[in-house]
Image (tube, rainbow, N blue to C red):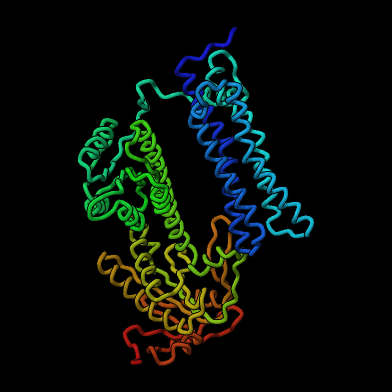
Amino acid sequence: MGRTLPTTATNERLSRALTAFLRQEVQAPATAITEFLDILIEDARRLRLDALLPDLDRMLSASVQLNAFVSSIIKDSSSDSPEGETPEAFHHRLRHDLRTPLNAIKGYSELLIEDMDERDEQPLRADLAKLKDHADQLLGQIDAMVALARQGDGLGDGGHSKETAIVDDLLRTVAPLPTNRALSEAIRSSSILVVDDNASNRDVLERRLTQKGHKVVTAANGTSALDLATTQEFDLILLDLILPEMSGFEVLRRLKVAEQTNDIPVIVISALDELDSVVRCIEAGAEDYLSKPFNPVLLQARVRASLEKKWLHDREKKFIADLEQEKRRSEALLLNILPQGIVNRLRNGETVIADQVSAATILFCDLVGFTTISQEMSADRVIDFLGRIFAEFDRLAAAYGVEKIKTIGDAYMVAAGIPEAQPDHAVRIAELAIRMLETVNDIAAATAVNLQARIGVHSGPIVAGVIGTHKFAYDIWGDTVNTASRMESHSLPGRIQVSAATRSLLGNRFSFERRGSIVVKGKGTMETFFLNPQMMAPM
């Protein structure tokens, strides 16, 4: 099957692509030579290598001449051909005019390198060697450059060069736009702010964007644009630079420093096409820059790309916000299980949490008779009733800065002095115990349930730590815990029984009455006291 001959449109597109290819392969090295020489001259002056400057200046002049010649040929391969000059003579002259400045650059660089080698001087030698490499590379591209002048004779008859084959492969993968110059893909409807002091420009942009299904709002000056951007939500802003009262650049700067608007992509569309303006706008945060008059198809593509980035950014922000919300939920759940200090230690890499606490106070509270009472209640009422009491206990524990350990059925266990030391741990627990009795009495009276609390308290050393790997818990152990439990089980309904150790720590802050003695396993007889909630001694 024979090769299909290219159409006129295909030839034009291939010619443009070939020119772009040669611009990359030929003009880029030529430009690099000039830039390299600028750097070498700056370095030579900085290092005070004045002897190098004359040759470097000659090389720079040759590179400027070379770049001008290369640019003129890429722009129009036939523009320099005098009338009557044969193609062969023209191609020969092209080779000569390209090689002359290149040979000068290469020759001067070789002479300078040789001088440095003879004197064993190394400053700038590496850069000069790189410069020579660039010149060699460009010399190797001269034939491709000359082939550009012949492209009109070879594209239609199968005379494709290596360069033509490369760009031809590229064009087969990049489909041309539809003949109606419109992008047919559906674009998600978005809200766009158009800022331009020219009414005609605003009308044209609004019309084009509205046709694509976007909601468009317009502003004639920078002040109005900023007011709209802070009071309405926009997915994109098209911004002119030359505006009355406030320049578009100042509008851009203010948009990008304000937290409320810095995420909105901005495409600058301006008749001011100088490089400084483009660079400054991009540095200030502009998403893109289009020069007027703009190509409507290119504008549509830029708008689409900016909106897609905005949508992806919005999705990312939502995803991060969802993660933060889940993190807060996990944090709250974790803090319901473990104290904040323990959570911090686990996050810092501790794998075993086990503390020997020299002084703490433990409280046990039991709801007397609740087992019997609960048999007369429905399951949901039992949970609701206990939840009401324990929720208030939790609030009181947090208010007094003590640590809830756990609930066991209708019993409640709390400790002070852990995980961080608290010198007033006994006082905190005593005040909490009084408030817990009041809470139970108030709820019992409000619900007409015959219920009382029985509380026991003891102070002493304990061991505290985290147990478990999946359903882990912060717990405490030791004789102090067992004794506090005995204080509760031997107490009376509506009373707070404390050990002699706790009584000693409380001093004269509260009023007590001696209860008597109880037998504690392993400790023998222990004197106990009732803490009188109605008779607090003055401080």
Q: Residue furthest top?
A: 1
Q: Is residue 33 visible?
A: yes
Name which residue lies at 51% across and 15% down: 6
Q: Is residue 99 left or right of residue 417?
A: right
Count of numbered tags: 0
User: Residue 63: where, in percent of width, then height?
Assistant: 58, 44
User: Residue 137: where, in percent of width, then height?
Assistant: 66, 38
Name which residue lies at 73% across and 58% down: 122
Q: Quadrant of residue 146?
A: top right
Q: Nearer the viewer, residue 373 or 192?
A: 192
Q: Nearer the viewer, residue 317 or 154?
A: 154
Q: Quadrant of residue 22?
A: top right
Q: Is residue 190 left or right of residue 465?
A: left
Rendered-image quadrant of the N terminus: top right
| 486 relative to 207, above or below | below
Q: Is residue 236 visible?
A: no
| 105 relative to 78, above or below | below
User: Residue 145: where, in percent of width, then height?
Assistant: 59, 30
Name which residue lies at 28% across and 41% down: 191
Q: Nearer the viewer, residue 59 or 39?
A: 59
Q: Residue furthest front?
A: 84
User: Residue 256: where, in percent of width, then height?
Assistant: 36, 55
Rendered-image quadrant of the C terminus: bottom left
Name which residue lies at 58% across and 84% down: 524
| 136 relative to 498, above or below | above
Q: Nearer the viewer, residue 491 or 72?
A: 72
